Image (spheres, rainbow, N blue to C red):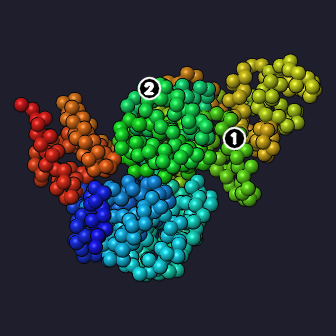
Amino acid sequence: MTTYQDSCEETGVFLPDSRHTVHPVNMASARQVLNDTFGYHDFRHHQSDIIANLLEGGDALVLMPTGGGKSLCFQIPALLRAGTGIVISPLIALMQDQVDALRQLGLRAAFLNSTLDGRSRQMIEQALLDGELDLLYIAPERLLTAHMQDLLQRASISLFAIDEAHCVSQWGHDFRKEYQQLSVLAERYPGVPRIALTATADQRTRAEIIEQLRLQQAAVFINSFDRPNIRYYISEGRNPRERLWRFIQAEHPGDAGIVYCLSRNKVEQVADWLCGKGRVALAYHAGLPERMRREHQQRFLQEDGVVIVATIAFGMGIDKPDVRFVAHLNLPKSVEAYYQETGRAGRDGQPADAWMAYNLQDVIMLRKMMNDSDADDCFKRVSSHKLETMLGLCDLTSCRRQALLAYFNEHLDEPCGNCDTCLEPPRTWDATEAAQKALSCVFRTGQRFGVNYVVEVLLGKEDARIQRNGHQRATTFGIGREHNATEWRSIFRQLIAQAYLDIDPDGHGSMQLTEKARPLLRGEARLQLRHQPGPEKKARRERSSRPVVELQPDDQSLFEALRAHRLQLAKQQGVPPYVIFHDSTLVEMAARRPHSEAELRGITGVGETKLDRFGRSFIELIAAHADP
């Protein structure tokens, strides 16, 4: 009879011997697994407490930033507890990479999804029943089927891990209705510990995760949301594509990155445009054929220096550690979405950039999308508030990181020194009088027109439409000639962003005064606004305070040789290069130049299985580059 292990070997996929070492359930064993299997020397953040809680049979809700080591929180307990750990993952396309990485570590991992043929599914299901799997990844839709529930009832389950748990919340940015049905786990498997994990969730979303997943008795672990290695840069203005290109050329000419756009059409246009500039840029959105999406994602994961241009359909759960920049060419719809998407940069802890360019049209488009949706009024009001908060982050004149962390109820004592407002403090001006003119003109024209029309009235343009509406007789006609049209558009955008003006849901972009505008119009309040930005400056290269290993010039050639060797091994294994070793591991090898397996074992990220499989070849390569 052909076994599951035989099937994997036939396809060239490494699967270790099914006779897996069983460790006693305690934290000493957890540390041994951390070191021997994963190659790490110490737990980070709350990993130790979370693992201890699960080993004792408790439930947990974990909020930990991208790259913070969430997966270890359930992988180690799954190895130590009897049975198979069931990991609920929302995207089928990502399961293969996660399972490949685990198999490279010597673990017995598999996934069940629609990409498998019937024979493969049967073998994996039998392996589950036979206790031959450490971890099994499935999508929530499959988990909820009667067949899968029957299978799980007959299997030995060590724990359930619900990854990307924010998908359960209708207030979140990646809502999946199937996640709300995962309360079935509490009902049917009351003795099996459950852990829900996410990288981002505000208080409302956290409350819904607890309610929907029935985690009222769970221990809650909230780590710092700070990603100090990421530099934030947000700007408003014209020619965003050209500014993006200057940024990429100046800061990341050969690096992997992600560019997010709001529409599918824009995704394809920007990808083609970047290709025309000489970069390898691939489009990714839900409208592309599945085969093409899969191919583009695999190229991004497995090749160096690829830029993926995508809608928000791309990115959740992406494990690529060396994404050096995430750029937005449109405004995200919420701070949660912005944090989640920018968090895909610099997972390896090395310096990375979160760059964004947006304009007023983004705001109008997002508001129209919200108003045209079939959501109820409550959801629309919450979504509108989230968008206003995102705009508030954009228009800050103080440290962006302090405001970003404050959104998640985390306090940062001092400005970060690693965002654009810290590195290049924005100039402000007393815009009280200009704002009063702008708001008065909106009122005098009937609160029925968009920005461009009102600007023309302020400038006193002899326009046929203005004449037809009789607004050349308005008291605000021509009172704003001290500013040009570009400056007035910036003023209006900031007034909208700060909720002095609202965009009417009629879809035509007409502006209306809010209650907040009254004290400003009456002279009871004053207003400071940003100056209209001039030509974009190259930001200084101050970076994170997090210590990183810096290569000396003599070590750079060795590092490149190590990367080339890693790429060759990755191609042989059919996995992304970072699954073999992260760049940070190679940097440490090049800097420390280990000459024995014992010395190599001391490098972060080198566990026992990888030492056995790859250690000798890397030691020989390092020796070949030794000084004569």
Q: Position of residue 487 (x, y in %)?
A: 69, 24
Q: Position of residue 188 (x, y in %)?
A: 50, 80
Q: Quadrant of the C terminus?
A: top left
Residue at 64% from the left image edge and 33% from the top image edge: 359
Look at the image and tell me whether residue 198 can be seen: no
Q: Is residue 128 above or below residue 422?
A: below
- Total label count? 2
**Label 2: which secondary element:** loop
In the rendered structure, which amino acid carries the disc numbered 1? Met
Q: Which residue is mark 1?
A: 365
Return the residue nearer the eye: 411 or 56.
Answer: 56
Q: Residues within 10 Å of mark 2 (few under 14, many from 20)?
A: few
Q: Position of residue 565 (x, y in %)?
A: 22, 41
Q: Is residue 262 left or right of residue 318?
A: right
For the residues marked 2 and 1, what is the alpha-carbon distance in whole angstroms?
A: 31 Å
In the rendered structure, which amino acid carries the disc numbered 2? Gly
Q: Which residue is mark 2?
A: 278
Residue lying farthest to the left in this orientation: 628
Looking at the rendered structure, which numbered label has been put on residue 276? none
Q: Nearer the viewer, mark 2 or mark 1?
A: 2
Return the residue nearer the eye: 133 or 57.
Answer: 133
Residue at 30% from the left image edge and 72% from the top image edge: 132
Q: Position of residue 520 (x, y in %)?
A: 77, 38
Residue at 81% from the left image edge and 41% from the top image edge: 512
Q: Residues within 10 Å of mark 1 (few under 14, many from 20)?
A: some
Q: Is residue 20 left or right of residue 426?
A: left
Q: Quadrant of the N terminus?
A: bottom left
Q: Quadrant of residue 263?
A: top right
N-term-proximal mark, 2 vs 1: 2
Return the residue nearer the eye: 57 or 374.
Answer: 374
